[in-house]
Amino acid sequence: MATAAVLATVATVLAVRCNDLRSGRQPATLCALQQTEETESPATTATSPAQRAITECDRRITRHQAALDAGADPQLVATWINQAQAEKASARQDLLATTTAQPEALTTEQITHMVSELGP
């Protein structure tokens, strides 16, 4: 069954394409709906924050290692690195959760059925 995010995307595109559906250009409109579904997956948009967090943690770890090389207190730097590594591990789990929980894209047949259920 379609998720709320998918239904919201379909509703948005349908609002824009309502005239196309009524004017007999239904196949082209359904194709556009399917393309929107494939490119605007919630999992795709959810991946970005986790990936940014991983990149930021890597940057911090590199900075902390440079501070250690420059003579900073090893115990303090170890605390900072451990914290950044823990945050990175958490972000990796978030990334894994979003990539493994990707909803399946709707097929043209599923979209056609949804549109027909909406009525004229």
Image: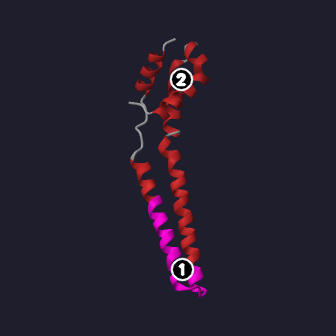
**Magenta includes 38?**
no
The CA distance from mark 2 to mark 1 is: 59 Å
Task: Locate residue 62, reporting x and y percent.
Answer: 56, 74
Determine which residue is flagged by label 1: 77
Q: Which of the marked residues, 2 or 1, is nearer the chain's N terminus?
A: 2
Q: Report the quarter where the N terminus lies.
A: top left
Determine which residue is flagged by label 2: 28
**Secondary structure beneath disc 2?**
helix
Residue at image position (57%, 77%) is 64
**How packed is label 1: few (under 14 Cα within 10 Å), some, or many (20 or more)?**
some
**Secondary structure beneath disc 1?**
helix
Task: Locate residue 56, reporting x and y percent.
Answer: 57, 64
Image colouring? secondary structure
Which amino acid type is shown beneath numbered disc 1?
Val
Which amino acid type is shown beneath numbered disc 2?
Ala
User: Taking 119 as reference, is 59 left or right?
Assistant: right
Q: What range is drawn magenta here?
A: 65-91
Q: Overall secondary structure of the magenta stretch? A: helix
User: Taking 117 as reference, is 74 left or right?
Assistant: right
